[in-house]
Image: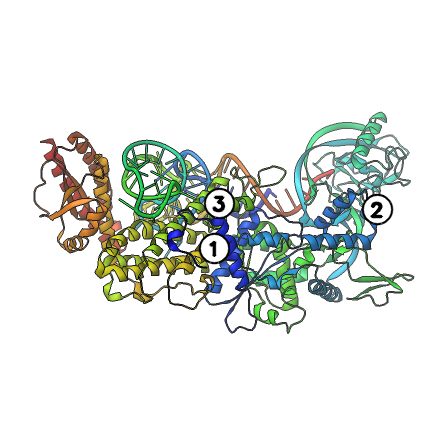
Amino acid sequence: MTIKIEDLPTVYDAQNTEREIYKFWEENELFKADAKSQKEPYSIVIPPPNVTGVLHMGHALDETLQDILTRYHRMAGYETLWLPGTDHAGLATQNVVEKQIAKEGLTRHDLGREKFLERTWQWTNEHRSTILDQMKRLGASFDRSRERFTFDKGCSDAVKEVFVRLYEKGLIYKGAYIVNWCPRCMSAISDVETEYETEQGHMWEISYHLKGEVGAIIVATTRPETIFGDVAIAVNPSDKKYSELIGKTVVIPLSGREIPIIADEYVDKSFGTGAVKITPAHDPNDYEVGKRHNLQPIWIMNEDGTMKDCPEVPWEIRGMDRYEARKKIVEMLQEKQALLRIRDHEHNVGKCQRCNTTIEPLLSEQWFVKMEPLAKEAIAAVKDGRIKFVPERWEKNYLGWMENIRDWCISRQIWWGHQIPAYYHKVTGEMVVAKENPDPENYVQETDCLDTWFSSGLWPFSTMGWPNLDSEDFKKFYPTTTLVTGFDIIFFWVARMITMGLEFTGKAPFSTVYIHGLIRDEKGQKMSKSKGNTIDPVQIIDKYGCDALRFTMTSLCTYGGQDIKISDERFEYGRNFANKIWNASRFVLMNLQGVDDKEIDFSKLTIVDKWILDKLNSVAKEFNENIKNFRIGENAHILYDFFWNSYCDWYVEIAKIQLADESLKLNTQRVLRYVLDMSLRMLHPIMPHITEQVWQLIPKNTDVRAIMVSEFPQFKEELVFPTEREEMELVFETIKSVRNVRQSFNIPMSVKFDVEIRAEKSEKPVFEAIEALIQRLAKVENITYGELEAPSPKKSATAVVSASKIIIRLENLIDFNAEIARQKKKLEKLVNEKNSLAGRMKNEKFVQNAPKELIEQTNARIEEISIQEKTINDLIAELES
RNA sequence: GGGCGAUUAGCGCAGUUGGUAGCGCAUCACAUCGACAUUGUGGGGGUCACGUGUUCGAGUCACGUAUCGCCCACCA
């Protein structure tokens, strides 16, 4: 990279810089982790994005935070691995390929399992790297040489191993249970994949005639289409209304089948009519009731949500879609006068998380993981601190779920996924669970596949070579250090990684779970394609630059992990900051010509040099502490403030003066360079490209080839300068107050004036030391000194700084009435503050209880105000006379 | 029904052991190419949702209320 400083553009060119710099890192293989290293390990596994995924703002945030942690720890001396990869995303990917073949007029059944899988692999191989390539645009420093896929050989072997072991331990079982069934996906889904929505529906009251006698029982239902699957009517045993009916038989309207009236505590007397129809094959609660009363379930609906062709269902209804059937049945009931009432009824309806189809509870044969025994350790690990959630409140959320854990339905009636390693004898039907088919001639494999989250749950160790415990990566980088993700997948993913990790490796898969908020649009709504409110990170990067995106995102991260509202314009914040860094760097680099490669000479430091070094030092201290506490957003703020407000606005401005002084020039150059260098290093994890680019241009004596592998700044005792820090505050206040006076009276910058400083005794040497600064920065002609107690001269403005006074003579230049008003306003503020402080000091309890320092502070402030008050009063008197 | 979060300047948000409130944007005034107008300088703007309590002192702690949002459970 040979670039002439003078030729650098005045506006930072993010597009070209970012492309070049990323290439530079890749070519030098700087992202590669070394499993043989002696350094302490730090590792993160990426939450694997779906292969079908397209980069969105959620990724941008998640990946940025992981990259910040990765880059920081790499610089801070850890052997750092950020392992990337993708998820095969069973149903999602299958849906995409099904849509594709639908264009050719085919369904997956037309192709057959084998051909369909071939097509899906083909699609996957074509798209597999897309999203990770997109993440390169985010500057992600993950190690692509270790990229994994949940469906690759290693992960698949791990899945089989885990399945067989769990089965052998009795923690996986197959059985008939009511599951959430999606009629569109034609598969079972787990509880966590079901989302509930409140819908406006109806409650139909249907009359069931008693058999062989006059009378009927009225049942309320929201799902009249299921009446053909009824096996009983249930009432509460203590319900006097119905006590005489228990044990009698009723007739299902329309179909004529006879069913008993039974008593069960499950029924709520006060709800509906107090009588419930029991449909065990199509309702979870009814299933339980049916089991208790030994009633055989009757299936009346197909897997695609149409009505079954079976004797229990009247011929008019057979084959109809469930909602059409509902309409038809209601009509028929009305005709038969069996429908007594229709009421509006609001209720919650389960929806398939993936396709939003209303789920159908369906009794079917599925595979489950027995969770309770696994949950015990997963609860303990969080309770005893082996795993920490940040922010802490998510711990409660996690524990609440774990403590009420239900068995996990892991079988899916799909083809794209890990086929369950169970084999059935073709003749006897005997089942064998094993990693491989024991006898392919005589055994056929279970057709169901596993829930995608089953393989994701193994991710932290399946990617590290497990079950091979001698794998170098497994030994060096497992358990991982930090997991970074959004709260929306705590149950889906985090909880399962914890249970699986503990069960199979005996170790928690990570020590900290860092949970960040979700990205929302400017109105606070979730971003979604259907709402059309998405913001494409790639477009933001094209428009503002990757570092701008990253900095803005980071700055919006709060400690509490609040959701983040974004809009296009918010990224101007980061872009402007990047541009500031660029131009300040350009200026500094231009002024480094002739500098040597030596360290700063401490004996030649000016008060300003010491001040900026001290500030830099405390920023370094804070930054490192903040990372430990996951206060990452705070780090963006302190760097922004330090770099822009301290370094650019003050230090660089003052350095311009020092550079003009031959005796100070060289050392000033060194300080400028040092502070720029260290600032860039601290900024690097957040804004990797621009910092790398500038750092490469700094003349320095080092064989470190990149900022990303340079040492991260740490707090240094020798850079602490408390006195200078305080004295500089006086300088700033003085300059600001002179500027304030100038602007208040509309005195143009071109007009210089004299200033008389009436310094308090202890402050006088400070003023004298920084006289030149005041002159230059406040555009002052001459500075003279006077007695603090001397009467204020007429026709002048006074600024009070600390315990000293700054007098500016304004003869013939200003409106005196305006000045009087200005001073009175100031006085009022001061008097209010003084009164409040004095009131506090009169309070005996305050004086007794408050810490000494605070009391001293308060007294000092009162005294200070008194001096200022007197000065201003005198001044007002002068002006009025 | 249970739980969690939010409520601070016009807008978006910070505020870690309690010591009288800050940042960005917007706004007003001034400055027009001396690193940067993606800029500089200065200013204005808040009874911290409400109530009660603890305390010498509460944005900060406790209890309660209101509004908004989210999660979990779910009665047909």
Badge number at residue A297: 2
Q: Is residue A599 above or below residue A818?
A: below
Q: Name the residue rendered at 42%, 63% in the picture.
A: A712
Q: Chain of mark 3?
A: A
Residue A366 seen anywhere in this rendered image of the structure: no
Mark 1: give few (<14), some (14-19) or many (20+) Cα within 10 Å: many
Badge number at residue A544: 3
Residue A577 on image: x %, y % = 41, 48
Badge number at residue A689: 1
Please identify, in this view, whether the residue under mark 3 or under mark 2 is nearer the observer: 3
Q: Is residue A818 above or below residue A234?
A: above
Residue type at mark 2 is Pro
Residue type at mark 1 is His
Please identify, in this view, whether the residue under mark 1 or under mark 2 is nearer the observer: 1
Q: Chain of mark 1?
A: A
On the rendered structure, is A470 left or right of A324? left
Residue A344 on image: x %, y % = 70, 29
Residue type at mark 3 is Tyr
Give the mark nearest the N terminus, 1 or 2: 2
